[in-house]
Image (tube, helix red, strand yellow):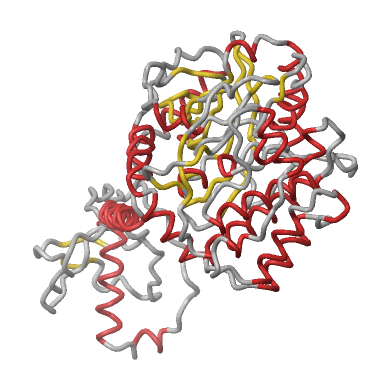
């Protein structure tokens, strides 16, 4: 991606010089400056990295103005103002300007990074019969300050060309219609629509570069008398005359781009300023179909209307021209444009992808000072967050283990409480008297039960039983001592006045010793 301003065209130098890594990793505000991917007369373009909290990052493109531009206070103000206005443009066919940074007498423009290549590179072929692609900064009567020989592929797919032009026109229209925060029209004009300022992404979409920045650069073109800055070959007559421009200047420039792609040659070629201006103002313009018979007549009409030297004879808006293209001719699908980009720029895309991968793999080393006071609690909570997290299944297993341990603890064996003594046993309440008839007719079983209960009350020992002891249940069981209950004795229970315990010893009954 090679975003360039309107004053100069950097196609030649951006392709001639390899990327530089001299300042890789330099911090500029929130950004890191990395590999240089293009350079020109106005600026160099670098890959950059925006870093945020929580490991967030984003790859961006950072345009770094040359020192003599960054030290001009008037240019800096215009650059910042126009970049701020261009930030109001939000459209998928416009490369967004994200930020402007001024630091250490340098000026940087941060832009969205889109993997792709400029239309100038995609449309160029290496042949011996080359055609100059541009006329850059020239003085009246002088020679161009620089030129870049190249040629345009004569057999580009017409449907691909129309798809790219349609995307660019939609992006231009979005910028032309941009408003400020109060809803007032900004009146943005690109002023430098050319193949060098059109990016075709690997997603098959074309985008406009440097919207707004080009207008800021153009505003400084009167600083030196007799100097015309920009690409004369794409200027409308009113721009050459220095008249006030509106959106129709961009429509004319897009008409020149479309004519050259369809015809496979340059429209206006001049080796000095006088010749170039004369052709822009007066040279006859033939339809591109005369140079390439495969171009449909309807497409010729669209191009010729956009190239009308009379401003009022052109399309009123870029959207109107885009709709006319869509109505008159078929456009290539996105997949076809994508395949064309990958085929034409395979090597450069691979090289730049390697640079991006290396930048993404870099880690940032941050030293955190020891926190004190209220910040210490925050630092502690952040430290806890560094412990490894437990998965949901592991948490379930841990909870189940805790439940089992709790159950084992509850059922653990404990020492029985001491047997209550006779003195500490509560005094039983005497039951109401029972008639002698009831006592005489009491069954032997009831008598034995009463005797056993009486023995438990006096000695705290269980009465002997003829039945075998029960087998204990599996697992430990907690023994809870029972509280002795008052014994209900019949009125005549002292015959005999004792009972025999399990060992055959006599145990006299309470209340029978008088």
Where the C terminus falls, by quadrant?
Answer: bottom left
| Residue 276 point in image, percent of width and height | 66, 34
| Residue 269 point in image, percent of width and height | 60, 39
Please give the name of the residue rendered at 48% of the width and 56% of the height, measured from the top-left corner: 203
| Residue 302 point in image, percent of width and height | 71, 63
Q: Nearer the viewer, residue 404 or 36?
A: 36
Q: Nearer the viewer, residue 494 or 432?
A: 432
Please give the name of the residue rendered at 25% of the width and 86% of the height, measured from the top-left corner: 444
Q: Is residue 21 left or right of residue 282?
A: left
Whether 301 is drawn above or below 33: the answer is below
Q: Nearer the viewer, residue 280 or 133?
A: 280
Q: How many numbered discs? A: 0
| Residue 52 seen in this snapshot | no
| Residue 429 seen in this snapshot | yes
Q: Is residue 72 left or right of residue 348?
A: right
Please give the name of the residue rendered at 57% of the width and 16% of the height, measured from the top-left corner: 66
Q: Splitting the image into 4 quarters, where does residue 250 fall? A: top right
Whether 406 is drawn above or below 9: the answer is below
Whether 298 is drawn above or below 52: the answer is below
Q: Is residue 77 left or right of residue 32?
A: right
| Residue 286 point in image, percent of width and height | 67, 57
């Amino acid at each position: 991606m090679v975003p360039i301003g309107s004053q100069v065209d950097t196609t030649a130098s951006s392709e001639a010089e390899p990327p530089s890594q001299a300042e890789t990793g330099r911090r500029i505000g929130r950004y890191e400056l990395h590999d240089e991917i293009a350079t020109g007369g106005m600026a160099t373009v670098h890959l950059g990295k925006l870093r945020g909290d929580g490991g967030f990052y984003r790859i961006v493109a950072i345009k770094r103005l040359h020192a003599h531009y960054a030290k001009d206070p008037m240019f800096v103000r215009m650059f910042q103002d126009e970049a701020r206005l261009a930030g109001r443009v939000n459209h998928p066919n416009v490369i967004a300007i994200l930020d402007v940074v001024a630091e250490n007498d340098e000026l940087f423009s941060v832009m969205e990074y889109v993997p792709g290549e400029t239309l100038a590179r995609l449309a160029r072929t290496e042949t011996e019969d080359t055609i100059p692609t541009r006329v850059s900064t020239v003085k009246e009567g002088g020679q161009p300050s620089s030129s870049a020989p190249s040629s345009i592929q004569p057999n580009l797919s017409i449907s691909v060309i129309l798809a790219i032009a349609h995307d660019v026109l939609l992006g231009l229209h979005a910028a032309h219609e941009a408003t400020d925060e109060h809803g007032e029209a900004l009146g943005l004009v690109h002023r430098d629509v050319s193949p060098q300022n059109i990016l075709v992404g690997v997603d098959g979409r074309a985008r406009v570069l440097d919207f707004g920045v080009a207008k800021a650069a153009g505003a400084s073109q009167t600083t030196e008398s007799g100097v015309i800055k920009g690409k004369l070959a794409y200027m409308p007559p009113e721009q050459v005359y220095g008249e006030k421009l509106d959106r129709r200047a961009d429509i004319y420039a897009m008409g020149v781009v479309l004519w050259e792609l369809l015809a496979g040659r340059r429209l206006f070629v001049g080796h000095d300023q006088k010749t170039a201006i004369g052709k822009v103002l007066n040279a006859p313009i033939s339809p591109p179909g005369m140079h390439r018979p495969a171009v449909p007549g309807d497409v010729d009409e669209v191009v010729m209307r956009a190239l009308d030297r009379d401003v009022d004879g052109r399309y009123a808006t870029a959207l109107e021209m885009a709709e006319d293209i869509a109505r008159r001719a078929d456009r290539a699908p996105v997949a076809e444009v994508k395949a064309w980009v990958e085929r034409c720029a395979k090597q450069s895309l691979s090289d730049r992808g390697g640079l991006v991968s290396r930048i993404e793999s870099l880690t940032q080393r941050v030293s955190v000072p020891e926190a004190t006071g209220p910040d210490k609690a925050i630092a502690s909570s952040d430290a806890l967050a560094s412990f490894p997290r437990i998965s949901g299944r592991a948490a379930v297993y841990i909870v189940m283990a805790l439940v089992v341990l709790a159950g084992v603890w509850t059922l653990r064996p404990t020492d029985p409480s001491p047997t209550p003594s006779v003195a500490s046993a509560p005094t039983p309440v005497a039951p109401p008297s029972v008639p002698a008839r009831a006592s005489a007719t009491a069954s032997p079983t009831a008598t034995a039960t009463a005797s056993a209960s009486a023995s438990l009350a006096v000695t705290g020992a269980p009465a002997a039983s003829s039945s075998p002891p029960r087998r204990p249940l599996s697992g430990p069981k907690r023994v809870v001592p029972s509280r002795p209950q008052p014994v209900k004795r019949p009125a005549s229970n002292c015959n005999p006045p004792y009972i025999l315990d399990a060992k055959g010893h006599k145990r006299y009954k309470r209340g029978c010793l008088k």
